[in-house]
Image: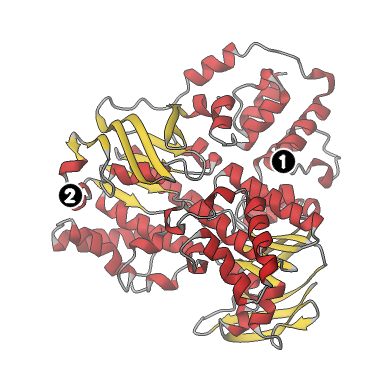
Amino acid sequence: MIEIQELTFKYNGAKKNALEKISLEIEKGGFVGIIGESGAGKTTLCNCINGLIPHHYTGDFYGSVKVCGNDTFDIDAGKLALKVGSVFQDIESQITGYLVEDEILFGLENFGIPYDQIEKRITDSLDTLGISELRHKEIASLSGGQKQKVVIAAILALEPDILVLDEPTGELDPASSVQIFKMLKKLNEEKGITIVVAEQKIMLLCEFVKKLIVLEHGTCVHYGEIRSTLTHQREMEEAGINCPRVLTLTGKMVEQGLAPKDMKAEDRICLNAKEAAEFVKKVMGTKLPDCTDTSDALQQIQESSDKAIDCDVVLEFSGVGFSYNETANVHDLNVKVYKGDFISIIGSNGAGKSTFSKLTNGLLKPSTGDVLVLGENTKKQKVSSLAKHIGFLFQNPDRQICCSTVREEIAFSLRNNGIAEDEIQARVEKTLNEFGFDGNTEPFNMSRGQRQRLCLACLIALNPEILILDEPTTGLDYRECMEVMEKIRALNENGTTVIMVCHDMEVVLDFAKTILVMNRGEILGQGKTREVLSNHELLQRARLLPPQIAQVSMLLGTVFYGIFTDDEMIQKIKSL
């Protein structure tokens, strides 16, 4: 279906090749994942398959790409779009309609789909994504995740032979991400659509794709069946790819003699929590006890070593309600956030998390109730006044970059907050050195991950009392994610209160001290991180999944209650 031979590509003005001698074939009905750290060439490879390269993005192109037997150089980009449906990384750039129905109708009418087929195609695509209720809604009123689903529905309505998706779950909650991949699997198996998906969430790729392409610095270092590719765990980690935690668990079990060392590499490859639980049961045999007493584990969770936070309240929601329209609102929010806390707000798409964060810094004023920041009511404060105390990192970094160089961007926020000019220069130089930026670089020539780091750097330079982060790890590879989160943790340890909206339960587990769970504009629960992540009923109500090792623990039975990391699991197995 797709044949790539000796593909090398360098963008106009670039100093090095984005892709280097890529050769591979994807068969009809294939389901192939592409993974690699930021800048590895994932998006470029996707754009070579869908014809955007060379028809839209130009540069030095060597080798060939054939789709359905046609060389992408020789086929018109419009005709190719009927064969290859594309979902881009930047969803906003792909949306053209005012209403959801308009967005799906746009492509159908553009390609001359017969009128008597249009209604069924619209209905079927909306049903497939589970968003029928959004059909007549304004796209501007939807959450980022809902917009993602609308774009995928619009592409599916065209019924392409090949579907190329560039990080389609980047802004989706865990349950919705799984739903998208289940939908892709169904399309692949039942309709025979060939699917190529670039994705940072390796756990999803492991569970759903048939083959995996591993890119490093524009070269293909591995391409093969998923289990076979995962046996190269060490090389993948060196390429900046964080392998699933269940894979780390089984590898440690072999290394520490808890599983046979002569075991074939493929036999210890677990693609999901269910397979990992079966692996543990198999190697333990009859040693796995049946225990229903979880009191000890519960007590350990309640007495977890999270640092105590100060008693000063820096943020308080009292009976807060806010409504954009009939589709998005929050109501009766009652929350206290204490100085020095690192709180993560979790919930499904549309739960009200971003609305909560915008109410915090005054971008939105409550319709009912009051929001107090450092004792001051946001209704009586200008956003500019609140900004002197609160740093805000948007979900999309491009919405807060406005200068032509990195140096100017960092200085801009400092100057706006009234910092003296000599102090500005000192802070800018310190920030450039700390993040390793070239001050003369134009921000929009940087990768998405680098732009995210730049926005964070601007906030850290301000040293705010409260830092609000709306999905700070979206679009970042593992290395970038860990670098960003470690800097946020260091800021928190120096006294900054952190409020983070996050879909990644592994990041929440590793960094947050407390959790606030939201669903449909309401607060379902709040507490210490491990207490909340142990409450499976609460997580289910919020349509969330616990961290992967916690899922394994749940499948192994109550004797493993409260186990969240691979090292804790290893210790437990040894004790048994």
Density class for disc 2 (Cα within 10 Å; few <14, some 14-19, many ≥20) is few
Q: Please give left or right for residue 229 compared with residue 531 in the image.
A: right
Q: At numbered mark 2, what does the secondary structure look like: helix, strand or loop?
A: loop
- In the image shown, does 512 or 426 lie closer to the viewer? 512
Total marks in image: 2
Q: Amino acid at mark 1?
A: Asn
Q: Nearer the viewer, residue 260 or 132?
A: 132
565 sits to left or right of 234: left
Label 1 residue SS:
loop
Q: Position of residue 434 (x, y in %)?
A: 36, 57
Q: Where is residue 218? Give x, y as percent.
A: 63, 71
Q: Is residue 489 visible?
A: no
| Residue 562 seen from this side | yes
What mark, if any, has residue 382 been given in the picture? 2
Question: What residue do we see at 35% from left, 43% from top?
Answer: 323
Q: Is residue 102 left or right of residue 66?
A: left
